[in-house]
Image (tube, grey):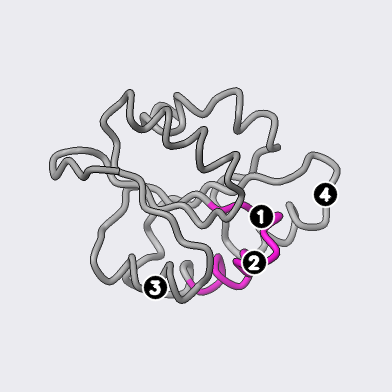
Amino acid sequence: MTENPAARNIIALISDLMFRSKIDSEAKIASINVSYAKSPDELNALLESQSPELIIVDLNSKTGRPIEVISMLKSSPQTKEIPLLGFVSHVDVDTKEAALKAGCDTVIPRSRFSKELRDIVRGSI
């Protein structure tokens, strides 16, 4: 995605191509910059060069180690104030609770994430 320096910046720890495509579509319409990471190392590299207004985390990611990442982000003085939005399968109550305990600011079901994606990307939620 072409970056617009004046636009809102979002970093997403998401490897699922379907969700990436949905986010890209909404971000393009709203002229929002979105950068993606598939792993904690990629996320750290992005955070060295960007100051996101939001970090979105796929809590069901098998490669992203989401709970570990949330703990890391919320324990760092440089990133603890960045809002974290996690999305998870509605039946995965244990992961939802672990994410909240680790410091995730908001956890919503995947279905709600898809339904409200436009507002999420634009910062209305």
The residue tagged 4 is 92
Which of the two marks, 4 or 3, is nearer to us in this view?
3
To which residue does mark 3 refer?
Answer: 44
Pointer 4 with pointer 1, Cβ within 8 A: yes
The residue at which mark 2 appears reads as 67
- The percent position of residue 40, horizontal first and vertical second, equals 50, 72
- Tell me how far mark 2 sits from mark 3, CA to CA: 15 Å
Q: Does the magenta stretch include residue 69?
A: yes
Compute the Cα span from label 2 to label 1.
Answer: 7 Å
- Between residues 80 and 13, which one lies in front from this camera angle? 13
Q: Earlier in the sequence, mark 1 or mark 3?
A: 3
Mark 1, Cα crowd under 10 Å, few <14 / some 14-19 / many 20+, is: many
- Asked which secondary structure carries label 1, the reply is loop
The residue lying at 79 percent from left, 39 percent from top is 90
Q: Which of marks 4 and 3 is nearer the N terminus?
A: 3
In percent of width and height, residue 36 lies at: 43, 55
Residue at 70% across / 46% down in the picture? Answer: 88
**The magenta segment:** 57-72
Q: Which mark is residue 76?
A: none
Q: Closer to the N terminus: mark 4 or mark 1? A: 1
Residue 72, position in %: x, y? Answer: 51, 74
Q: Kindly report the distance in space between the C-alpha atoms of the residues bearing marks 4 and 3.
A: 26 Å
Q: Earlier in the sequence, mark 4 or mark 2?
A: 2
Q: Is residue 99 above or below residue 31?
A: below
Residue drawn where x is 46% and y is 76% of the image: 41
57 shown above or below 124? below
Task: State the residue position of label 1.
Answer: 59
Q: Which of marks 2 and 1 is nearer the N terminus?
A: 1
